[in-house]
Every structure is written in structure tokens, then in C-alpha cells.
Amino acid sequence: MSRLAAADVEAALVALDTMDADALKLRWQELYGREAPHKARAEFLRRGLAHRLQENAFGGLKPAVARRLARIAEEAARGNEAVTVSPVVSGPAPGTRLLRQWNGQTQMVEVQVDGFVWAGRRFTSLSAVAQAITGTKWSGPRFFGLGSRP
């Protein structure tokens, strides 16, 4: 399925509300490439279809999140209800200082719980800091060398 624009996704989501069970099952077959679950109620099908439409248009879970959920499901299947999962870390820890050489000057950014501080100014994203430093749009993590590791 090709990606839909946001307005097309919204229209497709609204259309789900007017579909009967047979139409929902056909739509399920189109989007999932297999038959809808046996005895699935219309509301379940609508929710699954809504998820799939948005996943196709805007992207699914990040691989790290998918692995984390799979691990939780495995532990739950084994009967371990007290699964401990560390929080997803999406950036440097608060208190970290990021340094970057730019045009012969060292730029220092301090990571805080709710944002970043550079040159005495607060920013909500690292990309905004990189833009303030360079004057052009940058990926903040990339600018500061925080790219993903294999």
C-alpha cells in the first residue's frame, strides 16, 4: 500500500465508522494481507484497521520499542507479571554536557530534564540549539555526533 497523506488517512478513518462487518473484513484483508481474525467484532476490526492505516501512513514502531514490547509479551506469556523494563532512553541523560567545535569555537550544551541550555538560552530540542549555533537547520543529534550505534 502506498503512503497516504494525512487528510486521506483521516478520511479513511472516518469511513471505517460507516462500514459493516463484511466491509471491515474485506478492508482487513486488503491492509493485512490475510483474513480478519475469526469471530472478531466490528469494533475490534475498526481499531485494528485504524492502527494499520496510520502505521502505513506515518510509520510503525521503532525497532527498539518493538523489541521491548516483544520482550514484555514473552515475559508475560511465561507468567512473569512483574516484568521490569528499563525506560527507553532517547537522548543523553540530564547533566550531560555536549561539546562541538563550530567555526573555530567550542560550543557547549548542557542537557537538562526538560530541554537544553546553550549560551544561557533554553531550548526544547537539540536541533533548535544546532540551528541557533549554525544559522541553518540541522539534526541536533547528528550535529553533536549522537547518531545511532549499531
Image: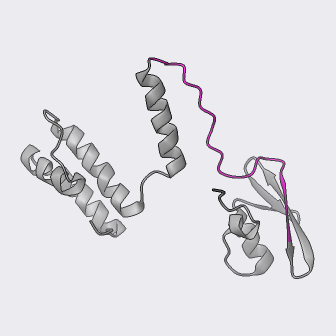
Q: Position of residue 71 (x, y in %)?
A: 49, 34
- Which region shows up in magenta? 79-100
- Which image quarter holds the N terminus? bottom left
Q: Position of residue 67 (x, y in %)?
A: 50, 42
Scheme of colours in the image: one colour
Q: Nearer the viewer, residue 74 or 30?
A: 74
Relative to 138, does residue 18 appear above or below in the rendering?
Answer: above
Q: In the orientation shown, which residue stands out farthest toward the left?
A: 22
Left or right of 50 on screen, residue 29: left
Q: In the orientation shown, which residue stands out farthest toward the front?
A: 150
- Which image quarter holds the C terminus? bottom right
**Which residue is found at the position 23% from the left and 52% from the top?**
32
Q: Position of residue 2 (x, y in %)?
A: 29, 69
**Which residue is found at the position 16% from the left and 35% from the top?**
41
Predominant SS of the magenta segment: loop
Q: In the orientation shown, which residue stands out farthest toward the right?
A: 105
Q: Nearer the viewer, residue 128 or 88?
A: 88
**Which residue is found at the position 75% from the left and 71% from the top?**
130
Left or right of 103 on screen, residue 30: left
Q: Quadrant of residue 137?
A: bottom right
Relative to 20, does residue 148 appear above or below in the rendering?
Answer: below
Q: Please check the rendered image and state whether residue 148 is part of the magenta-colored stretch, yes or no.
A: no
**Which residue is found at the position 44% from the left and 30% from the top?**
73
